[in-house]
Image (cartoon, grey):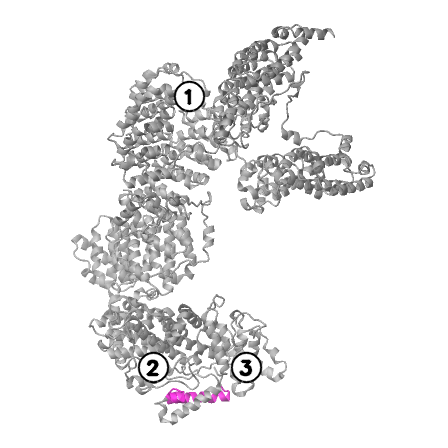
Amino acid sequence: MSEDEKLLKEAKKLPWEDRLLHKNWKVRNDANIDLAALCDSITDPKDPRLREFGSFFKKTVADSNAPVQEKALDALIAYLRAADADAGRYAKEVCDAIVAKCLTGRPKTVEKSQAVFMLWVELEAVDAFLDAMEKAIKNKVAKAVVPAIDVMFQALSEFGAKIVPPKRILKMLPELFDHQDQNVRASSKGLTLELCRWIGKDPVKSILFEKMRDTMKKELEAELVNVSGSARPSRKIRSEQDKEPEQEALAEVVGSGPIEESVADVPQAIDEYELVDPIDILTPLEKSGFWDGVKATKWSERKDAVAELTRLASVKRIAPGDFTEICRTLKKLITDVNIAVAVEAIQAIGNLARGLRTNFSGNSRYLLPVLLEKLKEKKPALNESLIQTLQAMHKAGCLNLADVVEDVKVAVKNKVPLVRSLTLNWVTYCIETSNKAVVLKLHKDYVPICMESLNDGTPEVRDAAFSALAAIAKLVGMRPLERSLEKLDDVRKKKLSEMIGGSGSGLPSGTNSAPVQTSGGSLPSMEASEGSFVRKSAASMLSGKKPAQTAPVNKKGVPVKLNASKKGDGAGQLKALKPVENEDVEPADMSLEEIESRLDSLIRADTISQLKSTAWKERLEAIAAFKEQVEGIQDLDQSVEIFIRLLCVVPGWNEKNVQVQQQVIEVITHIASTAKKFPKKCVVLCLLGISERVADIKTRAPAMKCLTTFSEAVGPGFIFERVYKIMKEHKNPKVLSEGILWMVSAVEDFGVSHLKLKDLIDFCKDTGLQSSAAATRNATIKLIGALHKYVGPDIKGFLTDVKPALLSALDVEYEKNPYEGASAVPKKAVKPSESTLSVAGGIDGLPREDISGKVTPALLKSLESPDWKVRLESIEAVNKILEEANKRIQPTGTVELLGGLRGRLYDSNKNLVMATLATIGGVASAMGPAVEKSSKGILSDVLKCLGDNKKHMRECTLATLDTWVTAVQLDKVVPYIASALMDAKLGAEGRKDLFDWLSRQLSGLSNFSDAVYLLKPAASAMTDKSSDVRKAAEACMTEILKVSGQETITKNLKDIHGPSLAIVLERLRPPGAFHDSFESARTVSTALASKNSSKVGKSTSNGVLKHGNRALSSRVNSTKGSRPETVMTVQDIAVQSQALLNVKDSNKEDRERLIIRRFKFEELRFEQIQELENDVVKYFREDLQRRLLSTDFKKQVDGIEMLQKALPSIRKEVIELLDILLRWFVLRFCESNTTCLLKVLEFLPELFDTLRAEGYTMTESEAAIFLPCLIEKSGHNIEKVREKMRELTKQIVHAYSATKAFPYILEGLRSKNNRTRIECVDLVGYLIDNHGTEVGGQLKSLQIVASLTAERDGEIRKAALNTLATGYKILGEDIWRYVGKLTDAQKSMLDDRFKWKAREMDKRKEGKPGEARAALRRSVREYGSEIAEQSGEVSRSISGPIFTRESYPHAELHMERHPIPRTLSPVNGPTDWNEALEVISYGSPEQSVEGMKVVCHELTQATNDPESSGMDDIVKDADRLVSCLASKVAKTFDFSLTGASSRSCKYVLNTLMQTFQNKRLAHAVKESTLDVLITELLLWLLDERVPRMDDGSQLLKALNVLMLKILDNAERTSSFVVLINLLRPLDPSRWPSPAQNETAAIRNQKFSDLVVKCLIKLTKVLQSTIFDVDLDRILQSIHVYLQELGMDEIRRRAGADDKPLRMVKTVLHELVKFRGTAIKGHLSMVPIDMEPQPIILAYIDLNLQTLAAARMLTPSGPVGQTHWGDSAANNPSPATHSADSQLKQELAAIFKKIGDKQTCSIGLYELYRITQLYPKVDIFSQLQNASEAFRTYIRDGLAQMEKNAAAGRTPSSLPMSTPPPAITLPSPKFAPLSPVQTNSLNDAKSLNLRAEPTNFSLPPSHTDEDIATNGIISRSLTSDHYSSERSDRYPSGVTSGTLDAIRERMKSIQLAAADGSGAENPVQSGVLPMDEKALSGLQARMERLKSGSIEPL
């Protein structure tokens, strides 16, 4: 035994103290080892030995021998693990010893020292630990300071801020920030970041940042970006660990699970108040002269004194002291006469409450009554400060609910309602922020107060009481309140329950709520105290990575002992472990020998040896073999790394042979794609080599593919991070440029969700775009363009400092890669196992910067500076911060910033307020949706700025609102707006602007249920005293009702009372969802409110409420932030296929019946505007109505432009909806927006020109809508507008009627607007000058004009004198009869002006005053006598069958019934014609006779001289003339039925007869006018009152003959279309008198019978007129008629033998018979492709089959063809007889005719027609077999035909699409023979005979009875005189198809002439009678045709 062993053996017998302090180090060492083992064996913490050992360690750990010291620390660790908290008594001295001796030792010593410190913290000796740390950080050796900081970091990280108080650490940090050693500074930054995790970034910044250098601040701010989420402790103190087994055992018994644990583990928020030291403010307050200042007489001095107190008290924590006297002073100042002083005093109280908290309780109770009493003030600033101070007093704990009960009781009885309501609001706040137990205890005191307030007379007080009750109920539930709430009625109970249920979850979440989880996942298990200590470095936080979690313990939490080695190496296992990720990523060095040894037998040895060969061919063979062997391995995962390492060494990346290189890359790619997990360290090994291979064009493709495969394996984010450094540092520029090109492909393949965009953008800016190589810059531009595709235009904000040339190139690239957003789907995906790890922050789009470090206390302080320049600089500094952050910031630190900006919203300098508003908007835009949480209600302060009277301020506020809505969406802003709108302090202008803004926002939404919260404010504002507010609220209400469901609105009606409710219900009435009266509506709302909540979901009686409370949950978000495009929005595109105007359900007559016709203009009432909006919505397309109903004038202008562009194509629709348009124009006139008004005045002349072109003029109702407004607004204050209105008025006078417009202008003379009166006076003069005859009956109104000569205003006097002078020019001295009584002065003025006017007329040679009027009278008298004689003679001689009719209700109500007169010419020229038409249109029946005389005179003159220009002028006005006369028919007959003479009836019929006798005039009448006229005539023919009129029988004859004449001479197509349309049942309102003994059906049947007879007349001559009519239009009208009936109705009518239907079938049959299969070529206006197929097609097919079977036609297509889309006229098809085959058949027939002498001319004409219709057809290709002579004959004949056509002897075109099978040759001398005409010439015997020509037969669908009557007969009278006269004047004509037909007809005529019975029975021969002159002329014509002496044209 050696001496040492003896010594050790002897020493074991010594006491522990002696052994441990022995002079021999080996003894000490052995003693420490034994002590550690003994402590490990102790299981009871109360073991007395432990108390004995505790005192030894202060000396043992200070041992001078390093190994002994380590063993001493091991023993101490074992001791601390065995001991309990009692050991803490030794902590201070032991910790001090360790700090003094161990922290500078060896690394293991330091590590064990830190483990000891952690165990002391576990034993709750935290104070001793922190005392020791305070000493440690002052060590001069930096090596000792870093471990101290690290152990504090680890203690805080593992135990949390609850165990390790952050306050003491915060005090230590400032001196460390300035330490000279960089490691110390880095560690201190890491510790600061850890503090941020536990107590938040904001407290740390506010406490520490003031004490840092700017450099440190910047570095910390950059690191703070990586700190996110809340922290949780991962280790528990010993006392808590001991409780764990008990809790787990209890959990197993009870089964409660880990709920309590999870709740207990939730970290509690650290109060910043506890972290800061209190500051004494009393001493500096005394020194500041506070007491003298508050007693000063000047308010500014008092305010400054209190402001100093406010400033001093603004610190976070104030040192307690005696503030009694200060509070007494403040109490006086609260009631100071100066508001500014009072506000400052109240703010000072709030600051004191926040800084003193519970130390201010007594003073708070003292001040509370005064503060509550002061709530009566209405000043916004004072009120706001009071509310904030009261809330601060409760929040700080100065007051609780128990303290304030009595004060609240007094306040709620205050006589001022504002005090009562705001007190209750404060109580509500206190309840909501109080503990449940407190409220449960005190609710009995507060519920009676609220119950009493529910009966208050002020709505605000009642609402506040409801809110307080709801707050109590939400906190404690309804059960404790049931007894108190029994007195409430059902309505209030329901409201209360809705307030409780609608405000959130209702009840607070209980203990079973889900535990909060950190971002890292679930909470890890607590580390056992005995587990291995893992050293953590504070500096590791600077990398942005979370500290690694410690090892978990076993399930039960039983301590796991660490068996220390008895040889002294047990503690050696405590190693500092690197983070797992670093270990994975960074590959360790490995030699080739080691690689080969680990390969085992995976790869053959010879392959490896060949890879090392110097011969490239051997290496190539080897790598190929290697590839085969690798591909043959099934499970590569175990060998991936070793394979990659081998390839990196041999052949290695320095391989020169390209083929070998390619093979190596392919092998690596294969391994990466095949392995299930590809380690990142393998990527790192390959990345440099692969990057270099990308630069080589020979290996580029496989290298890029390999990089993409790596990205799939480990994520592109990792690859990008590694490649950045390689590309930056590599010397080869190709590596950079080609690497960036690979990045482009990677972005396109994987998207940006795996990338750190900030790093990528910085790389592009700093490296790619800065490169001198153009290829690199271009590649970078492509990369940024690819990023733009995914992240959008926000990327531009990060590139603002790039050179302009590069920016323009980038813009081009952006256009190539437009933003696709979510729709841009990546092509490839990362392997699932790695994808979550590789997401690097790009998934949230572009990065946001943390600006909390820049928002320094100094900046916030300068925002409050008294110097406005400093405040402005601070606001600009904030803007600069936003710019530097690329306007994308994180919410961190913005709470204080927005709080500082909030104060500036109340700045006295308005410019600063506007700048602040812009900055707040910028912050919101930069922060995005997160701004809502950070803003803390700043929006309410922003909205208060709308109360400013400056428009610019309000515009700035609305701009801020726009940006806010863009950031957070409208639904988040609505509550603030609703509150602001109810604030009376907002002002009328502010409310108007806010309502307008709301309307604009809501107009772009289709469904927005949150808008219902605006219902009450809008309804209240609609009764506002300001008209502007009312208008704006009405517009907003329209939008609210549009976007809110009726269900939601009905539910919320109960919140609206009084007139507001009536208004809302009135707006809701049109849909029919509510009752018609306010009373019934109130009943409904009451009933709804009183219903049980369980029944809310049921449908109510009015069918509105269906889903109860769920209505509010439906919400549609608009396009975020995007404003509506001015050109075309997505919504517009969706409705483009619809018609712009929908007139389907329009009933203009009903609308006009409701119009009250007044001459005086009245502002539009609310219900009128609502009715207009309803009409616009009903009849206008959605995009148009959205623009027209918008409150934005720009959109209104867009709407007008839409109408302007579409006007030519929607004329008919515009006419039908003209009254609605005019009402809308009136609304625009009233709003008087100049831009919109000018646009309206630009459009209106075009509109009236269009109406004039359509032959339409305004009805009286339309004039009553528009003219009063136009006249009243004509005195606009802008000259340009006045000028346009003046011209428009004159245009309307032309278009409407001077007579009818005159009263409106006269009413304008009474206007209060002087300019309006001047304009109206000028208009009176204009009317007298240009429309003197029309206004002649209203000249007495000149008295009003004359009275204006006495006005004070010189302009009015001048205008009146000018107008009277104009009257003198027209009337001469007669004017004195109309001016009334005048003063001498007035007469003198007039006399002078009249003399001046006479001299002027004499100079201009205009004659003498009054001469023109006298000449006009003479002309009318002369013409009138002649026409009277003529018309009387004709009227007496009229004979023939007659109709009956009952007049249209009003001719004015038809769309095209009023023609617009031409512009008037001088008096003696064509003026007579226009004046005559005006008199006919608007004069009385007797007056109109004079006009008709003039018209007849003009017609006679024009007829006698048809070559004159007069006839051309009359033809132009023919439609206008007939329209006037058609409208006059009903008026004259109605007038005669009253017992007056029938003279006017005869004149109107005679004038019509003269018009229709001339074919040119008859053809000029439009179809719409013809429709009106025929309807009028037929209805009067059916009227049984006509025979009882004066000369009734003659009138019937005249009506009958006129009808025949119309059918004969009017345009045939129009006649057919009109008559087919009239076969439909007639609207009962069109009959002039109610049915007496007949039902409506019988009357309609009679009318239809007449129409059928008219159609029979037209159909009988159809063969001769088949090529004169437009078959397409006739077929279209037949198609429409059949489609409207439908097949079911057709079948029913066919069984009932319906005449109208049979007539339509007959017309169709005849058309098919005459045109054959060519009829299919005329279906261009029939939608033949529609499904199901149009009915008309089936009937055409049926007729074709029937006629073909009877051999009555030769079809050119297969019989029964039903596929109309392939018919010969449309799309040629080889399967059927196409157009080509049909054309060949036609040509063959024509050539046959040419070959016959008798038909050669007709054949040549038909062939000429073919060449015109088909110019591309080569007709001579059909004559190849013909002789040359025949071809020459044809060429000459075609040339002759062309000459004839040029000379006008042939029609230029015919309305057909295929060549006619036979051509019609009209006689050049005679009109075609018409059975309709000849029937009127026969005697009475012919009226009952059948009239069927031999060459015409009706199909079986018409029986003999249908055609028994040859005339259009209802009654029959004759007149031989009239018949003979008509025969002489109008000779008959003949129509023939071919010369054969003409020859046959000639024979019939000769037989008829030889046989005397031919005249009596013309039908037997099939030819109607002709006179001798006609017969001889026809024979002569035939002879010339035979001889060929004349052309047959």
Spatial separation of the CA atoms under disc 1 and disc 2: 110 Å
Q: Secondary structure at mark 3?
A: helix
Image position of 1157 (left or right of 1666): left
Q: Is residue 990 visible?
A: no
Expressed as whole percent of the image width and height from the top left, the position of residue 300 reads 33, 22
Q: Is residue 983 above or below residue 1962?
A: above
Q: Earlier in the sequence, mark 1 or mark 3?
A: 1
Image position of 77 (left or right of 1056): right
Expressed as whole percent of the image width and height from the top left, the position of residue 262 reads 49, 29
Q: Earlier in the sequence, mark 3 or mark 2?
A: 3
Q: Nearer the viewer, mark 1 or mark 3?
A: 1
Disc sitting over residue 1092 in the figure: none
Spatial separation of the CA atoms under disc 1 and disc 3: 112 Å
Which quadrant of the figure has residue 1336? bottom left
Name the quarter where the N terminus is drawn. Answer: top right
Majority secondary structure of magenta residues: helix
Expressed as whole percent of the image width and height from the top left, the position of residue 1882 reads 33, 86
Expressed as whole percent of the image width and height from the top left, the position of residue 278 reads 43, 17
Q: Is residue 1972 magenta?
A: yes
Q: Magenta region: which residues?
A: 1962-1989
Q: Earlier in the sequence, mark 1 or mark 2?
A: 1
Marks 3 & 2, CB-CB < 8 Å contact: no
Q: Secondary structure at mark 2?
A: loop
Q: Is residue 747 above or below residue 434?
A: below
Image position of 746 (left or right of 853): right
In this rendered view, identify the residue nearer to me: 784 or 1804. 784
Name the residue carrying label 1. 315
Which residue is painted at 37% across and 59% down in the image? 1247
Disc sitting over residue 1790 in the figure: 3
Q: Is residue 1816 visible?
A: yes
Name the residue carrying label 2. 1911
Q: Amino acid at mark 3?
A: Ile
